[in-house]
Image: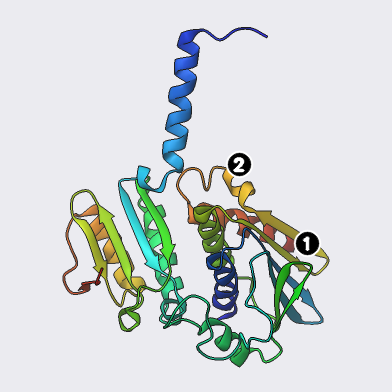
Amino acid sequence: MDEGDLAYEAVTNAIEAGARYIRLSIRKEDGRWYYLVEDDGAGPGSGMDVFAPGFSTKGSGRGRGLSLLKERHPDASLDRRGGLTRLSWTAPEGPVDVSAMAMLFSKAWTVGAGLVIEVAFDGGAFSWCVDDFTHLGALDEGMNMAAMRKLIQSTLSFEKE
Amino acid sequence: MAKLSLEELRSLREKEAERLAKRGIHGKDVHVVVCMGTCGIQAGAKVTLNSIVDEVEAHGLGNVIVTQAPCQGHCEEEPIVEVHTPQLGSIAYGKVDAKTAKRIVEEHIIGGKVLEDHKIKLEV
């Protein structure tokens, strides 16, 4: 699984756990990406080892995503602050997975959850929310993930110029 | 503020109904569902989904909607893709890599022919 897969998994976990607001923040600092997934879901409950293989609140056969994340990034941690669940980890520098972002917006829109994705690097910072794509027609016209990818990519490419 | 005529109201209602129909997943003729549980992603479902989206875009298929679903309990068959069309009903495919995803769009969705070599049966 690549970094985009892991970020997809983390946000999907929050959406499937019933969160109505999710924020994925990806920030580059000192040559590393700092990932943070924040959501307003109920959270796993205190004292539970969410990174243990097989831990899941969604039934049997689940519970591999977070253990894979921990396996790959031992610094992964989860805490609760002010009613929000915060999952964070760091990863080596690499490309931002635009297609995973588009998939997440599509998924969030389907269930009516609010998703914000923020990317900050090299002095530039961008953010997108579900409404951005709705206004531009990429979601209202039938979850056009190709259009969403182009919109995100064009914003990120603009930054590089 | 000027009053709307009955005709204008009817026109507005029709326009809104059309807009809302587009928002509905089932307002499309063809619905493609890619299973994106952990098992699916590990097996390459993200590549599969990207490939389907690319092909739908390349062929300009405005009647197709592509969505995601969690694990369906058939992890050994992942990546799994379900295709729902009025003509062929619901068909599930297993072990769908990028190449097979392209075939699903070209042969099943456009050509109306089931890919027997990848067809699987999902228990309800």
Q: Nearer the viewer, residue A88 or A149?
A: A88
Name which residue lies at 42% across and 59% down. B67
Residue A125 is marked as 1
Would residue A149 appear left or right of A75 to someone viewing this image? left
**Same-chain check, marks 1 and 2:** yes
Q: Nearer the viewer, residue A136 or A105?
A: A105
In this orientation, does residue A96 appear?
Answer: yes
The amino acid at mark 2 is: His
The amino acid at mark 1 is: Ala
> Which quadrant of the figure has residue B102?
bottom left
Chain that bears disc 1 = A
Q: Considering the numbered disc 1 on the image, is that residue within a helix, a strand or a loop?
A: strand
Color encoding of the figure: rainbow
Residue B60 is marked as none
Q: Position of residue A6 (x, y in %)?
A: 57, 78
Q: Considering the numbered disc 2 on the image, is that residue within a helix, a strand or a loop?
A: helix
Q: Position of residue A42 (x, y in %)?
A: 64, 69
Q: Nearer the viewer, residue A38 or A73?
A: A38
Would residue B19 appear left or right of B102 to someone viewing this image? right
Would residue A42 appear left or right of B94 to someone viewing this image? right
Would residue A32 appear left or right of B32 to someone viewing this image? right
Q: Position of residue A92 (x, y in %)?
A: 69, 85
Chain that bears disc 2 = A
Residue linked to disc 2: A135
Name which residue lies at 32% across and 79% down. B74
Crowd class of label 1 (few under 14; some 14 to 19; many from 20; radius 10 Å): few
Q: Earlier in the sequence, mark 1 or mark 2?
A: 1
User: Which quarter of the image is occupied by the C terminus of chain B?
Assistant: bottom left
